[in-house]
Image (spheres, rainbow, N blue to C red):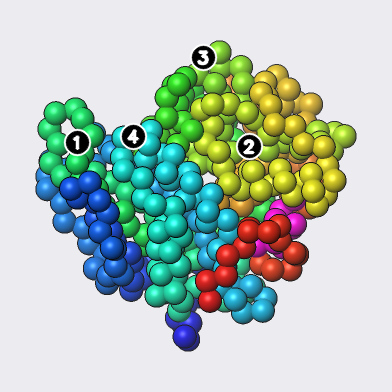
Amino acid sequence: MEKKQLDWANLGFGYMQTEKRYVSNYKNGAWDEGAITEDANIVLNECAGVFQYAQTIFEGLKAYTTEDGRIVTFRPDLNASRLADSARRLEMPVFPEDRFIDAIEQVVKANTEYVPPYGSGATLYIRPYMMGTNPVIGVKPADEYQFRVFVTPVGPYFKGGAKPLTIRVSDFDRAAPHGTGHIKAGLNYAMSLHAIVSAHRDGFDENMYLDPQSRTKVEETGGANFIFVTKDHKLVTPKSDSILPSITRRSIMYVAERYLKMEVEHREVYFDELKDFEEAGLCGTAAVISPVGKIVRQGEEICFPSGMDEMGATTKKLYDTLTGIQMGHIEAPEGWIRTIC
């Protein structure tokens, strides 16, 4: 199918409505067969569970065009599994993991003209999500749900691309101990909106959230995990029950250990350690890896030796290797790349 005539190289990270999306409804204890629809609008009762008690979860992944012209996705099985974990935590019915992957493939195939061409720097962002749809006025889970998937072509998440970011330590907490920080619930992201608007207003690119109990340990940003590189080139990633188990972060850890032969540590990272690291970055589906040049806490700055001009050398190797796998330049571990068409 012929591609849409878009300025692929200059796309921002924003929503562009495409023609087709997938919808499946849960009622009377079962999911229906689901179908592709052209209707982008959702009509719900004013008392729907999603509106009253924020019973909604989501995922995010991408489709890419490889150098040999295939359209592929990256580890969608992990997105299916994570959505299932999120559903269980919010007392929502699990959408079957095999059907999740099938829905992704259906939507991408139905919108192939929106999959950016190879080498454009853009990708097709895929957003699966689920919500409570029947009226709920007492505080309890909904009885009916809807699972949907839409896609939109996007450019880089951070407009500056590989330019190192300036992060501030937030005065707010992202998640409570034993709360929902480890799942992709919409309510977690609502909690971060005021903090990110405030950060941007004050000239920062993102927030760093510390653990809410002691405020001594690094957790994540509002939408990405942290990675750090030591002066002797070890990869260090923060560990916490409140951190979302990022698929990109887990993939970076594997790439570092198996492809780049780096030592990898997944452990608690104390804020006081940051001054001793060589490089820092944010990782996630949207950004892949974005370098961090500076972290600011109450006026005190931690400037990483890798600097504010470009991505650090080790971080760049990680980025190039992971994106090389995603784009088909580098042989992928078994099961990582799923060809759609």
Q: Which residue is mark 1?
A: 52
Nearer to the camera, 306 or 31:
31
- Per the rendered image, the range of residues in magenta is 318-326
What whole-number distance in Å separates the C-alpha atoms at marks 2 and 4? Answer: 26 Å
**Dot 4: few (<14), some (14–19), or many (≥20) neighbours within 10 Å?**
some
Q: Residues within 10 Å of mark 2 (few under 14, many from 20)?
A: many
Pick whichever of labels 2 and 1 is earlier in the sequence: 1
Find residue 258 and report its horizontal and vertical position in percent: 79, 48
Pointer 4: what residue?
90
Left or right: where does residue 273 sit relative to residue 34?
right
Disc 4 residue type? Leu
Question: What residue sits 53% from the left and 53% below the top?
Answer: 77
Q: In the figure, 235 relative to 66: above or below?
A: above
Q: At which x and y percent is residue 270?
A: 67, 21
Disc 4 to disc 3, how far (Cα)? 23 Å
Please indicate, yes or no, whether residue 125 appears anywhere in the rendered image.
yes
Q: Which residue is mark 2?
A: 226
Count of numbered circles on the image = 4
Cα distance between the residues tagged 4 and 1: 14 Å
Question: Which type of secondary structure does the marked residue at label 3 adopt?
Answer: loop
Classify 208 as above or below 310: above
Which numbered dot is residue 213?
3
Q: Are marks 4 and 3 in contact (CB under 8 Å)?
A: no
Give me the C-alpha separation between circle 2 and circle 1. Answer: 33 Å
Instruction: State how far apart marks 2 and 3 are (Cα).
Output: 19 Å
Magenta highlight: main SS: helix
Tell whether 204 sits left or right of 66.
Answer: left
Q: Residues within 10 Å of mark 1 (few under 14, many from 20)?
A: some
